[in-house]
Amino acid sequence: MRRFLLFALLWTNVLWAEVPPNSFRGEKLSFDVEWAGMVVGHAQIQILPTTDPTLLVMRTTARANETIQSMYPVMDTIESFLDTGTGLPVSFAKRQLEGSYQAEFKVGFDRKNNLAKVTGSAKGKPRPDTLITLMGGEFDLLSAFFWMRRSNLVPGKSLWFPLVDNRKRFATVEVACLRTETIETDAGDVKTLVMEPRIHGDALFASKGKLTVWVTDDAMHVPVRMTSKIKLGTIKANLVSKIPAR
């Protein structure tokens, strides 16, 4: 019964995704990344067309600034190819270069056979492939973020969904809409909704630090600020430029 109720919540929320995926096509968001009061890097989120009209690609990149890059290079790229009809991912890829650490991680979603195949390598060594059984409606990290932006967000209410990440399927991921908050930005005061992803029964987000996202309180829910608490303090990403969808 509990599993049935969770899936009922999931599909109710999917129906709340009011803004079509193609409404975001061509959007490009750029962020300054700060730590200890200094700009240490830059990040981008892009939603781009593909040669297949039924697919969009959502891509994020993160780079250290020139000073940090010379001492500790950071070049991370994450991509999710999305079905424009359902908003669900077809494939997901993550490439990491952080200091001496290198890793690649790919997920192919086979919806017909209810399987996700995970391949990849870490520290230059291939890891065994992993097969994950799907139960329906699974997102990856980027497609879940995109779906959140398209959904009807109400302070005091949460979105629930299943997620595939880190070679696991998480059945009950929650994104809580905590409150409205007007924040000060370089572009002026912005009315936002404060979002917080959570997971139940595992330590997915706990291992990466508490994440909070401020999105505009309008239909497009543009992320204008993100913070992540880590052992060495808080990392903050602030929106500095936006090329709107076209």
Image: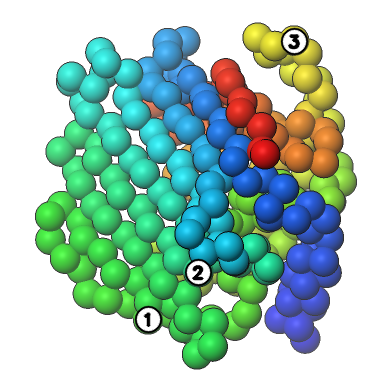
Q: Marks 1 and 3, Cα distance to the nearest angstrom?
A: 48 Å
First in sequence, mark 2 or 1: give its number: 2
Percent coordinates x, y for residue 164 in the rendering = 50, 67
In the rendered image, which residue does mark 2 sit on? 90
Between circles 1 and 3, the one closer to the viewer is 3
Q: Which mark is residue 188?
A: 3
Image quarter (top left, top right, bottom left or bottom right) of the C terminus: top right
User: In the image shown, does 165 or 201 lie closer to the viewer?
Assistant: 165
Above or below, 105 relative to 114:
above
Above or below, 231 relative to 183:
below
Instruction: Look at the numbered disc 3 and give the secondary structure of its residue.
Output: strand
Instruction: Look at the numbered disc 1 and give the secondary structure of its residue.
Output: strand
Please report the residue visible at 45 percent of the width from the left and 30 percent of the height from the top.
Answer: 43
**Would residue 110 appear left or right of 223 to someone viewing this image?**
left
Q: Marks 2 and 1, Cα distance to the nearest angstrom?
A: 15 Å
Please report the residue visible at 50 percent of the width from the left and 69 percent of the height from the top.
Answer: 90
Between circles 2 and 3, the one closer to the viewer is 2
First in sequence, mark 1 or 3: give its number: 1
In the rendered image, which residue does mark 1 sit on? 131
Quarter of image, res 91: bottom left
Q: Amino acid at mark 1?
A: Leu
Q: Amino acid at mark 2?
A: Val
Q: Residue furthest left?
A: 124
First in sequence, mark 2 or 3: give its number: 2
Q: Amino acid at mark 3?
A: Gly
Percent coordinates x, y for residue 185 in the rendering = 68, 13
Mark 2 crowdedness (10 Å alpha carbons): few <14, some 14-19, many ≥20: many
Percent coordinates x, y for residue 17 in the rendering = 79, 58
Mark 1 crowdedness (10 Å alpha carbons): few <14, some 14-19, many ≥20: some
